[in-house]
Image (tube, rainbow, N blue to C red):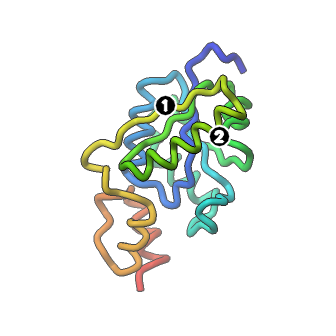
Amino acid sequence: MPTDNRIAVCPGTYDPVTNGHLDVIARSATMFDRVIVAVVNLPIRKGGTLFDSSERVAFIEHATASLPNVTVEPFSILVVEFARSRGAKAIVKGLRAISDFEYELEMNQLNRTQAPDVESVYLMASPEYSFISSSGVKELATFGGTIDEMVPTEVAAALKERLTR
């Protein structure tokens, strides 16, 4: 695959995908020729997932169907190796708070030791999504809280089905 195209990878667990994630993906799609949403197959940092990778991929594919330059793929290798294998020169991540920055700074430095040719790009969360996290959404759903404005409709239904006590 040629590396002269502006290709970016938006990696994440997306368990579940939130409207904040989708905002970062959509904004990335205006900045790059092609955006590959890379869904971590088996996350190490966060342990097990509520939804398997095929479910998470399907949720994102459905939610990004109107974005013709966005594709979704699961991956199980270093994100920089995944990016290189797809011809991407950028990894795009969203930042909500200082705690996100601290973690992403560490990841950026580790990634640069492995692939100095793959740049990290950070987008600040839009204000209306700055408080939304996948873990917070799951906790709200567990106790019957309102999550409809935080995630796509089909994700809200799936969460309510699996988590409502």
Closer mark to the observer between disc 1 and disc 2: 2
Residue furthest to the bottom: 165
Q: Type of residue at label 1?
A: Val
Where is mark 2, residue-wise?
A: 110
Q: Nearer the viewer, residue 152 or 20?
A: 20
Q: Quadrant of the N terminus?
A: top right
Q: Which label sits on residue 4? A: none
Q: How many marks?
A: 2
Q: Nearer the viewer, residue 103 or 119?
A: 103
Residue 70 higher or lower than 60, as above or below: above
Q: Residue at x 66, y 60 (%)?
A: 44
Q: Residues within 10 Å of mark 2 (few under 14, many from 20)?
A: few
Where is mark 1, residue-wise?
A: 121
Left or right: residue 139 compared with residue 35? left
Position of residue 136 measured from the top left corner of the image (x, y, whole percent): 39, 66
Spatial CA distance of label 1 from label 2 is: 15 Å
Left or right: residue 159 compared with residue 107? left
Position of residue 60 measured from the top left corner of the image (x, y, whole percent): 51, 49
Q: Compare marks 1 and 2 and give the one earlier in the sequence.
A: 2
Quarter where residue 111 is shown: top right
Residue furthest to the top: 4
Position of residue 100 measured from the top left corner of the image (x, y, whole percent): 44, 49
Q: Residue at x 61, y 60 (%)?
A: 45
Left or right: residue 94 compared with residue 35? left
Q: Residue at x 31, y 56 (%)?
A: 131
Q: Type of residue at label 2?
A: Leu
SS state under label 1: strand
